[in-house]
Image (cartoon, coloured by chain):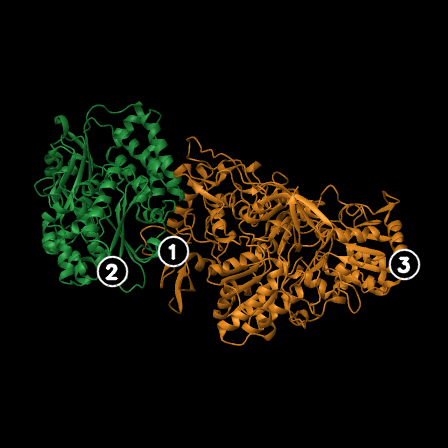
Chain colours: A orange, B green
Amino acid sequence: MPEGLLNIEVDGRAVQVPHGATVMDAANKLGVYVPHFCYHKKLSIAANCRMCLVQVEKAPKPLPACATPATEGMKVWTHSEQAVGAQKGVMEFLLINHPLDCPICDQGGECQLQDLAVGYGASASRYDEPKRVVFHKNLGPLISAEEMTRCIHCTRCVRFGQEIAGVMELGMAGRGEHAEIMAFVGSTVDSELSGNMIDLCPVGALTSKPFRYAARTWELARRKSIAPHDSLGSNLIVQVKGPRVMRVLPLENEAVNECWLSDRDRFSYEGLDSEDRLTAPMVNDGGTWREVDWQTALERVADGLAGVVAQHGGSALGVLASPQSTLEELALAARLARALGSENVDYRLRRCDVTADGDGARWLGMTVPDIASYDRILVVGSFLRGDQPLFAHRIRQAAKKGSRVLKLAPVDDDWLMPIAARAIVPPSQMATTLAEICVAAAEAAGVPAPAATADIAAAPGPAARAIGRELAAGTRRCVLLGALAEQHPEASQLHALAQALADLTGATLGFLRDGANAVGADLAGARPRGAGLPAHAMLSDPRRAYVVLHAEAEFDFASPPVARAAFERADLVVVLSPWRTGTAYADVLLPVAPFTETSGTFVSGEGRVQSFRAVVAPKGQARPGWKVLRVLGTMLRLPGFDADSSEAVRDSVLPADVAARLDNRTPVAIAARTAQEAGVERAADVPAYFSDSLVRRSPPLQQTRDAQPPLARMHRSLLEGLGLVEGAQVRVRQGRGEAVVKAVADAAVPPGVVRLAAAHASTCGLDGLTGPIRVERA
Amino acid sequence: MNAPSEFLDYGPDAVLMAGLTGRNWRLADYVQRGGYDALKRILSERIPPEQVVAEVKKSSLRGRGGAGFPTGLKWSFMPRNFPGEKYVVCNSDEGEPGTFKDRDILRYNPHALIEGMIIGGYAMGCARGYNYIHGEIWDVYERCEEALREAREAGFLGKDILGSGFSFELFNHHGYGAYICGEETALLESIEGKKGQPRFKPPFPASFGLYGKPTTINNTETFASVPWIIRNGGEWFANLGRPNNGGTKIFSVSGDVARPGNYELRLGTPFATLLELAGGVRGGRRLKAVIPGGSSMPVLPADVMMATDMDYDSIAKAGSMLGSGAVIVMDETRCMVKCLLRLSYFYYEESCGQCTPCREGTGWLWRVVDRIEHGKGRPEDLDLLNSVADNIQGRTICALGDAAAMPVRAFIKHFRDEFRHHIDHGRCVVAPYQ
């Protein structure tokens, strides 16, 4: 690419653009609007709508601004007679077969075609022939394609699938007037990013199925918020009508979610009005639940907690909070525990080995956009697309531009991007394999491997060698530990080994944190100090009383049966939740607000502090969690509960320099390893739409392919070795629990591993996300 | 395949098609006619590629597929020192209504094309070529496969051709019959296994073509002319025709003539000569109109046509284009509305649907012409047709939009009264025009 800038003139105004820029780029730079439909800054150039035709000096005919390269000295007119004539001609063509159903179209009011027709369309049509009708399509529970006659064939949705989502689920079939957008025969659109196609569609062809006919867009207020599901911290526009959240759209933030949203962030709001919303405090009187007023409920909680502490000491209390909770809730929950003399407070509910956690907050190790700058990206233990749908897209874009993605995982799930090298090993082998990668990388770089790793892995296998070679060959490397690596029984060893590998190769070490606010929870002190017990120990060594914030025993814990048993044995279990949940083990249910009804703060994986306000009023008697905890602290006459705003709570815990608290180093040493006995192991993912209490209640998300009941996925050899056929029911035993599920062969799962998802009712009897299991015919 | 002998009479000026009987298509026959001499000479004398290109430039050979772009100039656009693969592609996707010349070359003289493509590959530094054959001609595809087999066996294709160190491989690719795949970038997409839709240009194939590599695409007749240029020299070829219109050209004459068929004439031959060669207007009727260059080109009335010579520049001066050389002759009994209806339906049917003006406009044109033909025309329809055609022409990704628009404008321009009559009376002018 030649250096220097090109001088071009648009509508008589001079502008400089780099080589390779288009006329559209130049116009955008000047703030000149050129009408368009198919052009989108994040997608490839199609130049098919022809709406952006402009006049170019010396060109015999109008040229599309989106696809015409700027050249030195070029003169362009975007609103000349020729340009506007061409644009109006195109607009007429777009409208002749477009139905005049704006009054009942969901896109009405936010429709690019409607808007541009005002400027470029005629008031009456010259087209008097029969209009085209396009048959509707079923694209699944999220995207409505009921009115494909509205489609103007811009192919943005097609290009989004190919270029951003990484999978082409829509295409344009047929020719000429018969061309239509459709999915493969009998298929739906199942990408975890599919909802963006709704935003991209410039007309009302692809609309939101959950939002369909629910409101007119101009009736909706737009309020900013932050997505509460993954650690990316996507910026949201929550659209509300009166007391209800009607729709969620992306708030563009190039540094975070760009202009995209994952389907989880976009459609989880549908769970807000779930039937089991808790709208009043409830108490359990000898097995009977009844609604009470706040005073009664809080007195019961305060008396109960004071009683347990008085009788059994502070350490008899355990506080367990979901990493979906806000910084303010976590800060006050931790403060409550400590003020009552307990260090037993934790948010790391799905983890069982937390010994490597240092004092700081583990984080991404980089900014989100910075991932593009790495040419070698090793991801260890992550179900990337489910765990981090949009960060996966960032990695996919990096891979497209030449970054080489490396993978160490127990399951070779399809990330829809090229993987340069992969090691797919059972969970129990992951630490050894990571050590092998260290040795291989050291060999390839011609430096000595850390002694501890060499002891473990004398002779690396071919997969580890390939990854090691790749890392050594790179110039800018990173090692990212995913949720599965953190939830692993040997998480501290994986951390130590990843750190050794990062030190050896000069790589950045990062964590793909589970939950929206894991970093915030660390900063809020929602972790035990000193002799305090981490979550798994609080449960395996049961406490007398528990305060549970936003979490559900069956779905949010490493071992649901252990959690459940501990809660059932306890004298007092207080559940703070937006849902009527835990009625089998709780004594008091306190209705707290979901993220839309409270102010609060999430700190994203990259350490970005994002505060938000309530977008609607709390439902019924529900109250923001931080307020409930504040009142509780006040009733118990504890110090530190006098903040009168969530901002005051936030400011009381958030360090002035958040970055200084982000730290991925661990003091844990690499330990010697003994050979593991061979057996069948479980590898559990937490599917995207089971990941927290809100998404689990979103009906459209629960209807998606990704939310289907878990299957025991295993290698065909294992399936056949068990004498099973595809689709047979199997009994899976793990620890004291068992689950009966369907078995299927899956070439992505290595022999000796069964992939069986967690956080679902059918598998919540199983004891741990990984570990030995027994599988037999049911 | 055994055509009657008069079918192979391409006229007294025939060069490419001279001496063909319909059965002498094999390699041995071609060699006997002097075939592969040009290639052998280039390779044995190690004529530099630049010199081959210069010779083609000197010949004034212009693209025979329709646009008439100077072939030597096109060849010189190929980046000479590009690292990696480059391709030559032959566009044998002959789908333009009225055009049926390339299939005769492929059928009766396939080695002329093969030799031309090998020379093209040599001149442009390509090691690989594709011949994209229209999807509806199976026997031709099979014959071309057989011809390729012969050429490979004889050592004209493959590694180290004739011990020269030059390697070239050629493949036939059978299309599926879509007209749009004759558009060169749609053709490339189709070879790549994608839906045949034109690409936006720039970039042009010479820099970003097949599989993203520099590619030159020429018509069958263009490549097949190259051996004669090399054998007899560019100047000889140029002198067959007129300045800037070198060589002979095969004209596919169809419609109301006594002897429809392919005729190879020196460029610049008067249309009257061609008409006479084709036996004149059938049944002694009067000539009414001629489309001189395939269905995409503007129609010309009889008097204009009779005063015109058949070469690129003369026909352009007369208000149309030589195009692919498909001469569609219409006599006094032809209804011009019905003729246009047939053409408009074709473009409506063959539009790929990618870009708006063509996708929406071709159907509009067809429906309005259809109404007029069926007695439901309105006075304002002719202006509407012109306006819709204006809005398509020059606004589309590829030339199909222009091809759909140009006939409409020309038919209305030259035969407006006939259209008016249809609109006013609900039926056509049966009486002769004039």
Expressed as whole percent of the image width and height from the top left, the position of residue A376 reads 51, 66
Q: Residues within 10 Å of mark 2 (few under 14, many from 20)?
A: many
**In the rendered structure, which amino acid carries the disc numbered 1?**
Thr
Q: What element carries label 2?
A: loop
Q: Is mark 3 on a helix, strand or loop?
A: helix
Report whether A686 appears left or right of B389. right
Q: Are marks 3 and 1 on the same chain?
A: yes
Name the chain under label 2: B
Q: How crowded is mark 3: few (under 14 residues within 10 Å), some or many (20 or more)?
A: some
Q: Nearer the viewer, residue B101 or B157?
A: B157
Q: Taking the image as drawn, is residue B380 in sight?
A: no
- Which residue is painted at 89% across and 58% down in the image? A308
- Which residue is painted at 72% across and 49% down in the image? A737
Query: Which mark lies nearer to you, 2 or 1?
Result: 2
Quadrant where the N terminus of chain A is found in the figure = bottom left
Q: Name the residue under label 1.
A: A68
Q: What element carries label 1?
A: loop
Report whether B111 appears left or right of A237. left
- Which residue is painted at 85% across and 56% down in the image? A545
Name the chain under label 3: A
Quadrant where the C terminus of chain A is found in the figure = top right
**In the rendered structure, which amino acid carries the disc numbered 3?**
Ala
Expressed as whole percent of the image width and height from the top left, the position of residue B273 reads 10, 38
Q: Mark 2 points at which residue?
A: B125
If you read the primary sequence from the N terminus, does the residue marked by circle 3 or circle 1 appear first?
Answer: 1
